[in-house]
Image (cartoon, grey):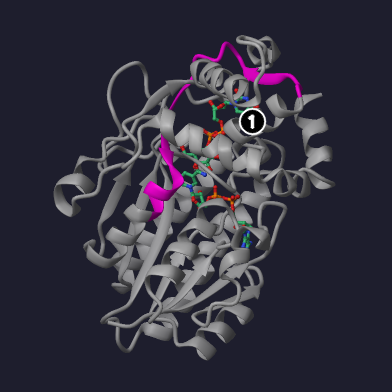
Amino acid sequence: MNHNILITGGAGFIGSHLTRLFVTNYPEYNIVNLDKLTYAGNLENLKDKEDKPNYTFVKGDITDIDLIKKIFEENKFTAVLHCAAESHVDRSIFDPLAFVKTNVLGTATLLQTAKEFWKDDYSKKIFYHISTDEVYGSLGDEGFFIEETSYDPRSPYSASKASSDHFVRAFYHTYKLPVIISNCSNNYGPYHFPEKLIPLCINNILHKKPLPIYGKGENVRDWLFVEDHVKAIDIIFHNGKVGETYNIGGHNEWKNIDIIKELCKQMDEKLGREKGESEKLITFVKDRAGHDMRYAIDASKLKNELGWKPSLQFEEGLSKTIDWYLNNTEWLQHVTNGEYQHYYEEQYK
Ligand code: NAD
Ligand code: DAU
């Protein structure tokens, strides 16, 4: 079947990979990318796709209901792939209300508009909400998040994402809006904004700046290459069951300190630096407030029902990622100008 798809947040990290995949693999679909272009949105991320006949960009805010209604009217959307969000935990600690506005009100605005436009015929429509494993809270040494794990968000970011998930389910149960949710673990890869651990440390190693590790570096994250995440979204979008939730994860747990040591090792080799040189940049700094200890996803539902599994080993994915940043220093320079400097000084002073 054909689709007119609204992708929100398509100029961000995951959104740009998702948009690239859909624009490339589905020339018969019309794709509209709606993005506010906050500090995290960057049209350079989709330069290679901007002239494609099945792709249009609209600058705008997901909380602007008049704009959302206008583009629904004009484009007769049959699907929404909702990626737009405020996504950085540390920023949510500074400014929680920005997260409530975009992540909660923005999601509710999209749901309400989709309901209004689709209410006479829900068939062949889908509202796909892209969410996070952080809604499940923090794990101890054992266990994994499954789809039935109770929600226990602990940061303003994860609370806002949990709330948006609840609204999506509420629209399914109350109005029968056809929805799907996926909750994914930490992504890494090209176009990742350098406020997040891996790209921040790649940038700092490149410039021989301190590598700030929160607390003792013992916190654990489950890392997935971003292209594997968007392949999973593609599979779920086309074959997933309406009303269901799917967990997506890499089965790839790393302590922060170990991941940074691996990064230092690989970058020393690639930059022709002396072995151990970059590790000397590691600096333990004040811990993140309310820092979740461990995330780990059980993605067996997705594997067993829809046949998805990650394609890349982590060391290989990390090497590809470092190569991308080393070959795209101009991109890195552009996104670390201006607002980034101000944020960095505030966060790491
Ligand atoms: P990102 O911060 O890189 O990109 C977010 C995009 O949304 C940007 O392009 C930004 O301009 C846009 N945006 C923000 N507010 C907007 C608004 N009000 N209206 C329109 N556009 C707006 O985020 P990301 O890391 O690509 O995350 C994308 C989605 O995936 C988010 O919903 C996030 O919660 C989820 N997620 C991220 C990860 C991860 O590791 N990065 C993991 C699991 C889930
Ligand atoms: O789990 C999915 C989530 O992963 C997504 O929903 C979020 O949008 C995404 O930002 C990410 O959240 P994290 O908080 O896990 O990612 P971040 O890269 O900010 O941090 C990863 C770990 O590294 C975390 O334990 C905090 C730590 N850290 C982070 C930064 C920025 C540091 O030690 N030093 C740092 O400077």
Q: Is residue 228 magenta?
A: yes
| Residue 280 position in % (x across, y down) | 68, 9
For the residue pair 178 and 210, the one nearer the viewer reads as 210
Q: Nearer the viewer, residue 67 or 17?
A: 17
Residue assigned mark 1: 202
Instruction: Name the quarter where the C terminus is drawn.
Output: top right
Kind of residue at badge 1 = Ile
> What x and y, as percent, mark residue 285?
69, 15
Give the image quarter of residue 239: bottom left
Answer with left or right where residue 30 lies relative to residue 202: left
* Badge 1 element: helix
**Residue at 72% over, 52% down:** 39
Image vertical order of residue 294 relative to residue 122, above or below: above
Task: State the image quarter where residue 241 is shown.
Answer: bottom left
- The stretch in magenta equals 208-230
Q: Residue furthest left?
A: 304
**Crowding near the residue tagged with mark 1, few <14, some 14–19, many ≥20 C-alpha atoms within 10 Å:** many
* 214 vs 66: above or below: above
120 lies left or right of 339: left
